[in-house]
Image (cartoon, rainbow, N blue to C red):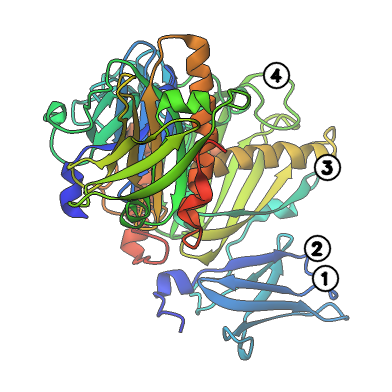
């Protein structure tokens, strides 16, 4: 897994890390403290205080500093220790700091990389085109390696946001999947379907982005002529060899109530997705998103 | 197969159960330093302790002692008898056997946390400490060559509720005795008897390198608190420490002086780690 330490990985939804909070995430077997100061952006550090090894994710955010839960050492956003409460008048030497990781926020998600500096993010798929109007929906955590789950997702289909809304109970929507298959280069899947009373159409396609680790970001783009393209992004997080996070983001509608419904809908859908991913014997049909 | 253990770990005395909880109808099947142990009390009151195979067959009988309200044994051949605590002979003290708390970490992390002063305001907020009274004044930590014990002296700390019987905040004097690597006793100003010290002790029973049953007692001058009140006070403190202890990385105590960054307030920990290193302790350290 060593080369993937250079890659950017989604580890959480931006809205799952409110200002003033800290939490732990696991990436490639590494324990990481994720926190956000009152005013600032997300920070990703090694989850181990340099003093006595306490996990910093248990710390308390005080303004724009993270205060360790054990002895209250305070670290600023440059991961530098600024205050040791046991010695109130001494300013800590510059050598007292926490190893930190590159950390960016885009597409509704928080991305980090374990090796290399924070540069190069803009060139990756993670930066994406949904950046401006992204809507984070839900994270699910599934047993299985990233490779296994990505395999399972090949050929799967995902509902673009507007259809998801039509599919809300009582919306009078009904559809039928006619066929689905993989594109020739295995990098995308195509779903043919028919809306009630309409001709068959290619409704949307699933593409696996070329970023490393292979297939860790999956985009679904609606392909209908009468509507603007809509996207759903699934970003996979290799937590360990045996556990994977899947972070779902879609586009914001610009309307709070509609966004709330989208989030609700994809949240429910994500739970079905998890069931599907955890049951290799389940037929693909088993998770038609609009049922 | 149990791995070979170094004398520094083998030759210590370990508590495997409190005397009152080892009843004739209640044997204690447990582990010590990664090996299966069975402690039993006969109907006539005699205690026997044996080391067993993983399959439950007797391997050998182990030495056994009952003292300070606990049942003690060893897997090695201690050069010293079990350390003496003369305070147990003093009139007017109450012994509170606090029961066992299982903690997923190494015995060294547990003892070091027990010796630690600067965590009081953050872990035991408004009980053993409170911001902004966080300063740790200089104190002494020294290996006593004649007894081979580590002593930490001249400690003081401002405490809002120093003991169960405390009526308010006070500047409290502390000292610590570490009679063997994996046992520690603290002495702190008694609210119940002017000029005297109350004792609190911990005897970690290392089940595995990073898993311990911690036996804890208090020996105090306190005529006012109920037994339950004292127990609750102590257990509350220990549960606060457990959250810390189970979330330190690594779980084994690092003996390399460069592995973690101490400050002057950690003098006791620095001496403790150095002592363990010189003794050749390998069990539970990194
Ligand atoms: S372990 Fe973080 S301040 Fe001591
Ligand atoms: Fe404590």
Q: Mark 2 lies on which chain?
A: B
Q: Which of pointers 1 and 4 lies earlier in the amino acid sequence?
A: 1
Q: Residues within 10 Å of mark 1 (few under 14, many from 20)?
A: some
B179, A166: nearer the viewer: A166
Point out which mark residue B20 bears: 2
Mark 3 vs mark 4, CA separation in Å: 20 Å
Point out which mark residue B168 bears: 4
Q: Which of pointers 3 and 2 lies earlier in the amino acid sequence?
A: 2
Q: Residue at the spot x=65%, y=69% of the render?
A: B72
Q: Where the C terminus of chain A falls, by quadrant?
A: top right
Q: Where the N terminus of chain A falls, by quadrant?
A: bottom left
Pinpoint residue A60: horizontal percent, then vertical percent.
45, 24
Mark 3 vs mark 2, CA separation in Å: 15 Å
Q: Does residue A248 appear left or right of residue A170 in this picture?
A: left
Mark 1 or 4: in front is 1
Tags 1 and 3 touching, CB below 8 Å:
no
């Amino acid at each position: 897994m060593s080369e993937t330490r250079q890659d950017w990985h989604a580890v959480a939804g931006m809205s799952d890390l409110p200002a003033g909070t800290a939490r732990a995430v696991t990436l490639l077997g590494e324990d990481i403290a994720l926190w956000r100061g009152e005013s600032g952006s997300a920070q990703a550090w090694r989850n181990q205080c340099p003093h006595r090894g306490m996990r910093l994710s248990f710390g308390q955010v005080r303004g724009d500093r993270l205060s360790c839960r054990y002895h209250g050492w305070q670290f600023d956003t440059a991961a530098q220790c600024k205050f040791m409460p046991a010695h109130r008048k001494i300013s800590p030497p510059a050598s007292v700091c926490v190893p930190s990781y590159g950390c960016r926020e885009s597409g509704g998600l928080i991305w980090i990389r374990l090796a290399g500096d924070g540069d190069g993010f803009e060139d990756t798929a993670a930066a994406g085109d949904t950046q401006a109007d992204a809507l984070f929906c839900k994270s699910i955590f599934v047993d299985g390696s990233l490779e296994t789950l990505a395999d399972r997702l090949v050929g799967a289909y995902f509902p673009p946001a507007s259809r998801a809304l039509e599919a809300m109970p009582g919306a009078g929507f009904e559809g039928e999947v006619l066929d689905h298959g993989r594109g020739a280069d295995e990098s995308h899947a195509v779903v043919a379907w028919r809306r009630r009373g309409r001709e068959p159409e290619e409704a949307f396609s699933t593409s696996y982005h070329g970023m490393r680790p292979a297939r860790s970001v999956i985009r679904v783009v609606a392909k209908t002529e009468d509507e603007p393209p809509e996207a759903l992004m699934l970003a996979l997080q290799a937590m360990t060899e045996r556990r994977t996070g899947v972070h779902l983001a879609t586009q914001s509608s610009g309307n709070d109530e509609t966004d709330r419904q989208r989030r609700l809908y994809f949240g429910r859908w994500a739970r079905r997705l998890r069931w599907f991913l955890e049951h290799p014997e389940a037929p693909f049909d088993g998770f038609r998103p609009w049922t | 197969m149990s791995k070979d253990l170094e004398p520094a770990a083998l030759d210590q005395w370990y508590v495997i159960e409190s005397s009152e909880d080892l009843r004739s109808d209640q044997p204690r099947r447990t582990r010590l330093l990664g090996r299966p142990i069975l402690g039993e009390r006969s109907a006539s009151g005699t205690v026997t302790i044996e080391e067993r195979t993983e399959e439950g067959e007797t391997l050998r009988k182990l030495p056994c002692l009952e003292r300070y309200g606990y049942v003690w044994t060893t897997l090695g051949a201690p050069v010293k008898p079990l350390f003496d605590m003369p305070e147990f002979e003093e009139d007017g003290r109450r012994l509170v056997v606090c029961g066992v708390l299982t903690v997923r970490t190494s015995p060294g992390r547990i003892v070091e946390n027990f010796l630690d002063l600067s965590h009081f305001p953050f872990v035991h907020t408004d009980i053993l400490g409170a911001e902004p009274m966080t300063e740790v004044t200089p104190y002494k930590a020294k290996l006593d060559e004649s007894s081979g014990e580590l002593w930490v002296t001249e400690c003081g700390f401002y405490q809002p509720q120093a003991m169960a019987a405390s009526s308010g905040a006070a500047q409290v004097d502390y000292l610590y005795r570490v009679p063997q690597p994996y046992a520690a006793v603290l002495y702190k100003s008694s609210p119940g008897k002017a000029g005297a010290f109350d004792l609190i002790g911990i005897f970690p029973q290392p089940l595995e390198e990073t898993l311990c049953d911690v036996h804890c007692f208090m020996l105090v001058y306190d005529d006012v608190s109920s037994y339950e009140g004292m127990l609750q006070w102590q257990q509350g403190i220990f549960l606060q420490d457990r959250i810390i202890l189970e979330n330190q990385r690594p779980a084994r105590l690092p003996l390399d002086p460069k592995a973690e960054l101490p400050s002057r307030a950690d003098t006791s920990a620095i001496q403790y780690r150095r002592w363990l290193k010189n003794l050749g302790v390998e069990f539970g350290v990194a």
